[in-house]
Amino acid sequence: DMLARFRALRDEFQQLRMIYRFGIDEVSTKIDILRQEFESTYDYSPIEHVRTRLKSPDSMLTKALRQGTELAVPAIRAEIRDIAGIRITCSFVSDVYWIAEMLSTQADLRLLTTKDYIAHPKPNGYRSLHLIVEVPVFLSRTVEHVTVELQIRTIAMDFWASMEHKLHYKYRAEMPPHLAAEIEDAARLAADLDDRMGRLRDEVRPSPHQHDDTPEAPRP
Ligand code: 0O2
């Protein structure tokens, strides 16, 4: 009956979310290890902060309906690849690529796709590096291969994206043209700030001849 079907679906979704939470845990640990290594060995860490999020059953279903995915767990797993999301914020653009490289070359992570919205910003000015990776999660009886979306961006990109997200959410499809123009302009300013910060960093980067107790971080 209806109730039994509802309960079965609810249990399947709970199981699904648990697996994706484990996927987030696995990848988060990798990021945390890199961060701790950087903090204890070098005087500089390319990772500013990390935030994770797990899509709610509601937004999984909304997305499935929107993109025409069958409302069944296997189809959802195959076609919604951002159920598990991790956002890494870095200080500098070069750090974004550096972190992406360090993670995607780890032997147990499989890089499925890369979308480089830094090299190719979206029309509204959105910039970020998006990776979809697949990580194995070892359960008692099975190994689950879980996809995790990584969004890697600078503080300036993150600042812009959170503002844009609020305006987008507020106006939906009807963003007044002057605001859309303002947002695009702000994206250019954020990109310019990233360029300037990158040049400043190059200035303060210690020269290889400088003697110091802390080993110099291996930079890209
Ligand atoms: P939330 O709430 O952050 O999860 P799709 O995933 O189907 O929407 P696509 O092309 O497969 O689209 O994914 P894409 O564009 O690589 O990345 C989608 C996610 O990137 C979004 O997730 C946002 O987090 C972020 N993003 C992409 N474009 C923009 C943008 O213009 N502005 C802002 N602020 N964020 C953006 P969700 O699911 O839309 O939202």
Image: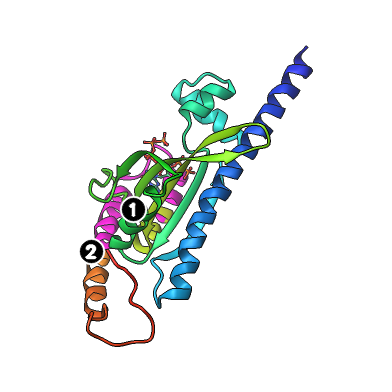
Q: Mark 2 highlights which residue?
A: 192
Nearest to the observer: residue 184 or residue 49: 49
> Which residue is drawn at the image coordinates 70% and 28% (left, top)?
10
Judging depth in this view, the residue of 177 and 100 nearest the camera is: 100
Ligand 1 rendered quadrant: top left
Asked whether residue 164 is in view, the answer is no
Mark 1 or mark 2: whose residue is earlier in sequence: 1
Q: Could you tell me which residue is drawn at 23 percent across and 63 percent down? A: 192
Relative horizontal placement of residue 19, taking residue 168 as reference (left or right): right
- Where residue 167 appears, as percent x and y from the top left, is 42, 49
Query: Is disc 1's CB within 8 Å of ligand 1?
Result: no
Task: Tell which tag, 1 or 2, sits nearer the viewer.
Answer: 1
Q: Is residue 165 magenta?
A: yes
Residue 4 in which image quadrant: top right
SS for callout 2: helix
**In the image, residue 67 lies in the stretch drawn in magenta:** no
Residue placed most toward the observer, 3 or 206? 206
Boundaries of the magenta span: 163-191
Amino acid type for the residue under numbered disc 2: Asp
Kind of residue at disc 1: Glu
> Taken as a whole, is the magenta stretch helix, strand or loop?
helix
The answer to the question of whether label 1 and label 2 lie on touching residues, with beta carbons closer than 8 A, is: no
- The quarter of the picture where the N terminus appears is top right
The answer for how far apart the CA atoms under marks 1 and 2 are is 24 Å
- Locate residue 152, reporting x and y percent: 39, 53
Disc 2 residue lies near ligand 1 with CB under 8 A: no
